Image: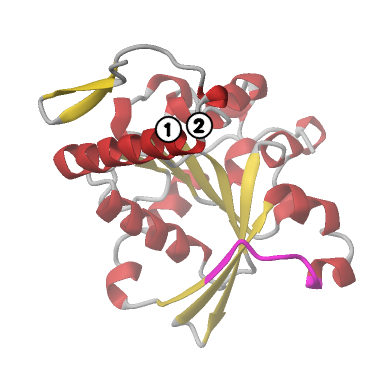
Amino acid sequence: MKLAYKHKGVFIMTKKHDFERNSFFMKLFLFLLWVYRDWRYVLKNGRKFNEFGVTIFCGRQGAGKSTSLVWYLESMRKKFPKCKILTNFGYDKEDEPFVDWKQFFEIRNGEDGVIFAIDEIQNEYDSTKWNNFPEALLREITQQRKQRVKIVTTSQAFTRVVKQIREQCFQVVECRCLLGRWVFLRAFDAYDYNAVIDNPDKKMRLRREWRKNYIMDDYLRGLFDSYKKIDRMKNTEYLPRENRLL
């Protein structure tokens, strides 16, 4: 029985098969066949954007959160050069500014993906513009890979981010900076992190997903305008404290 045929250099399966009943060698053949197809696709078209979910960079003031956001965006631009980037902090390479939560649901970029980078998200969420923000709809976007939407944010503390956002978070990245130049990052699963956030002993034993570090040079510092963010916050109308979500 013919399992596949070659079309324009790519093997295509001819019909649906019962993979569970196939022999080990048949499964191995099919596995290698599709790995080869994926490899050919990447060589021809570049990587598909595969980032999704919410990542929060946390740390005290001066810990390098905003610069780490830029460091992440720079690495994503190199990995996915066609992805669209929106930020609220004047990132020099942004495709357009992030000014309204409706952009979460309106901006798409096909298989090339979209990254929303939001500095100090707790300040954004407390503004009157976010008063009618539909958290349930955000869940549908951030938890489906096929949406090809990634949201990265910063906050001085994970607990300062409202519960509605924390529940959609996939990863927490702790930031620490040595002498204003050497930044150390530790990433944790957000669900596990949230479970031990108030227990220092358990938090010390929490397993890391990855650990990285980089040097904060003048190039990275020059890629965003912190004064622009401050000026925008001055002109933002915020909700009264009693009306803010926790």
Residue at the left extreme, as displayed: 8
Say which of 141 and 43 sits in front: 43
For residue 201, which quarter of the picture?
bottom right
Q: Disc 2 marks which residue?
A: 23
Q: Is 150 situated left or right of 47 in this image? A: right
Q: Is 216 situated left or right of 157 in this image? A: left
Q: Which mark is residue 26?
A: 1
Q: How is the image coloured?
A: secondary structure
Q: Position of residue 78 (x, y in %)?
A: 26, 55
Q: CA distance from mark 2 to mark 1?
A: 5 Å
Residue at image position (80%, 73%) is 204
Q: Is residue 1 above or below residue 183?
A: above
Q: Does residue 36 show up?
A: yes
Q: Does residue 83 show up?
A: no
Q: Is 149 situated left or right of 78 in this image? A: right
Task: Give the secondary structure at mark 1.
Answer: helix
Magenta part mainly helix, strand or loop? loop
The part of the chain drawn in magenta is 204-211
